[in-house]
Image: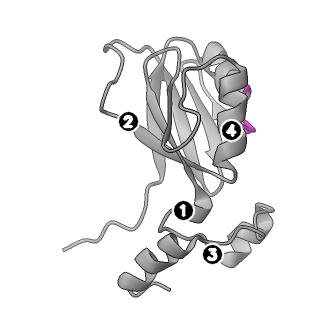
Amino acid sequence: MVRLVGINHVALEVGSIDDALEFYGRFFEVELRGRQARMAFVDIGDQFLALSEGRSQPADDARHFGLVVDDKEALRATLLEAGLPVGARGHLRFRDPWGNNVEIVDYRDVQFSKDAEILRRMDLGHLEKSERALGELREKGLA
C-alpha cells in the first residue's frame, strides 16, 4: 500500500483571479508562486493554494477545506470587522464570494507538525502545540 503523507495543494474555483487575490489578500498575506491566464498559485508555507477561474457549481454547504493559520482569533476579528458572518468563538468558517466554504484552524491546535527548520524560516518558531494536539500526535507515535 502507498501511504498518504500530506497535501501538496488545494485548488479552488473562483469567478475571477484578480477578485480572488484581492479578497483573500484582505485577510491573509498573499505571495504569488506563479500565475497563468486563468490560474494563480499562492504560497501557504511549504504548500500552495491554486485559484482557478471559472466556478460553475453552487455554494458549498457541508463541503469545505481547512486552512491552518498562525492566529485564528486575530483572523476571526478581521473577518468580523470586514462584515463576514462568522461566529464570535469556537469553530471558524467563512464563505468566499464564490461559495467556497473555508474552515480556519490554528496551527497550535492541529495534529500535523512542520519541521522546526521550516517553522523557523517561516518566522513561526514561537508557535507551540496545544496539549490536545500533542496528545493526538503522541497517540500516533509522532511526538
User: In this orientation, does residue 106 appear?
Assistant: yes
Within-10-Å neighbours for mark 3: few <14, some 14–19, many 20+? few
Q: Which is more N-terminal, label 2 or label 1?
A: 2
As displayed, is residue 99 above or below residue 25? above
Residue 16: which disc?
none
Q: Which is more N-terminal, label 1 or label 4?
A: 4
Q: Which is more N-terminal, label 1 or label 3?
A: 1
Q: Which residue is mark 2?
A: 64
User: Residue 98 colored magenta?
Assistant: no
For marks 4 and 3, give the one nearer the viewer. 4
Locate residue 109: give its quadrant.
Answer: bottom right
Disc 4 from disc 1: Cα separation: 15 Å
Q: What residue lies at 56% left-to-right and 41% top-to-bottom?
A: 89
Q: Which residue is mark 3?
A: 115
Locate residue 88: give its quadrant.
Answer: top right
- Residues rendered magenta in the picture: 26-32
Q: Secondary structure at mark 3?
A: loop
* Three-letter residue code for mark 1: Asp
Q: Which residue is mark 1?
A: 109
* Three-letter residue code for mark 3: Asp
Q: What residue lies at 60% left-to-right and 71% top-to-bottom?
A: 129
- Magenta span dominant secondary structure: loop
For marks 1 and 2, give the one nearer the viewer. 1
Across and down, in percent, residue 108 comes to: 61, 64
Q: Quadrant of the N terminus?
A: bottom left
Is label 1 in contact with label 2 (beta carbons under 8 Å)? no
* Three-letter residue code for mark 4: Leu
Q: Which residue is mark 4?
A: 75
